[in-house]
Amino acid sequence: MTQEMTTASGVPLPPVAGPDHVAPDLAARLGEPGGFPFTRGIRPTMYRERPWTIRQLAGFGTAQDTNVRYRMLLDGGSTGINGVFDYPSLRAFDSDEPRAGTDVGRGGVAVDVRDDFDALFKAIPLDEVSVSLVSSQPIGAVAHLAMFVRSAERQGFDRRRLAGTSQNDFLMETAITIAPEALPPAGSFRLACDLADFALRELPRWNPVSVSGYNYREAGADATLEMALCLAHGQAVARELVRRGHRPEAALSRISFFLCAHNDFFEEVAKYRALRRMWARWVRDELGVTDPRAQLFRYHVQTSGVTNAARHAHVNIARSALQGLAAVCGGTQSLHLNGYDEAVCIPSEHAAMTALRTQYVLLHETGVAKVADPLGGSHLVEYLTDSLEERAASVVRVVDGLGGIVAATEQGWVHSELAGTAYADQMAIETGESLVVGVNTHLEGDDEEMALFELPGGTLERQTAQLEAVRSRRSSAAAAAALDAVASACRSDANTMPSVLAAVDADVTLGELGRVFRDELGRWEFPLW
């Protein structure tokens, strides 16, 4: 008897897929590239018309340290900036907060004040290069965007020319990265939508929300749950922006997504295709929007960090290349490939440049960029696309039944689902059901020598000294008045962004803003049991 096999998310796999595995009326579900329902891609000729943005992630140490890495990547061929912040900055704690000390500059760049953004983007043409601010938690994202805008304006750039994305995902704060003094889901979602509302009015080239399916996946979701959480969250943001008075067409065209490229190649390709179709149909059928631009499911992809192994780390080059290939075959608009050493350290320059050049191998040497949707029509890919759509739609209905994504988070449903899939995945590795080279199979041989990246010394001391200098030079009365205005905005229905911009002008720090948000919007106890 042939052993039954499934994809990573449990979709049954036939020994060979054929016409019988594809539902009738395939042509209607496919359409043409650039046409509804966009299963085959968002543009008619895809990468012939416009290659994906090569946007490698970077961030460590101080803003000055990271600026050097940004410029190295741009000089090496990156076509966009993908900036990640350290944990205190993401959570809106100042670097001199006692709880922050050991994390300052690790896992991302440390930023506390507007001056940090001056240094972070020094000598970078912000009217030409798009910037992704990986400010995943709204409590930090609103301040980061305000500091970025004010810094850019101080350098002579028109805010209406600034192009880029704020990650800005309330689930990151309330379900993914558990941290001290997180905002409640409703408060965090409110700040995320304040940022989006402001950007729609003031920053015409800025994508103010990037729903972070990647991080859901890294926290344990399988492909189905990643899809469902992305869709439910994106739908909630769209509904709220429409409630705030924005035309659906305007709001929808500015919502973007951030997805994972995991190991199961064909399932990942099918996931991207199914998401485009599901989003386009929801936009048309629920919101009545027929503008093609507003129906597009636009997304960035990062290769999976949790699939990288510390042992035999150079094998991660192959993992990331194949995951990147899945993202490209699935039609991504933007891509980051992980460095081979990211399981053990921040990427070294060698690892970062190897990942960057791997993207150019995909673009120039494989041929996959020459044809839109190169795997479209494959019996297996179409079967998986249909199956994932059906499964994800079922989960979205559960979320809707709980009252929507915010309510589902408040009730602990999101946490429970993530924990369940994460546990099942780990058990599959521990029992050997899922084989991972260098982890539970092919362990023989010594690890290869790697020159590990070393963080620049003195990051905490430099950040602390700068904070002291800013606090000593500013008007204490002006800073206090600015913080009072932010608190007043939190207590009303007003958008908080204008008051945050004014606070940045008064040299208020990130941690001071975070304290006001927590005092006014609350501190949440996570529903863990």
Image (cartoon, rainbow, N blue to C red):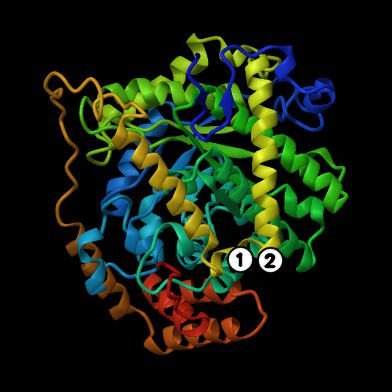
What residue is rendered at 59% in x and 30% in y? 332
63 sits left or right of 448 in the view: right
Q: Which mark is residue 485?
A: none
Q: Which mark is residue 406?
A: 1
Q: Nearer the viewer, residue 319 or 450?
A: 319
151 sits left or right of 283 in the view: left
Amino acid type, label 1:
Val
Q: CA distance from mark 2 to mark 1?
A: 8 Å
What residue is rendered at 19% in x and 38% in y? 453
Amino acid type, label 2:
Gly
* CB under 8 Å between discs 2 and 1: yes
What residue is rendered at 32% in x and 53% in y? 109
Q: Nearer the viewer, residue 129 or 487?
A: 487
Q: Which mark is residue 403?
A: 2
Q: Whole-percent x and y of residue 192?
A: 58, 64
Q: Whole-percent x and y of residue 196?
A: 64, 60
Q: Nearer the viewer, residue 397 or 130?
A: 397
Dot 2 lies on which element? loop
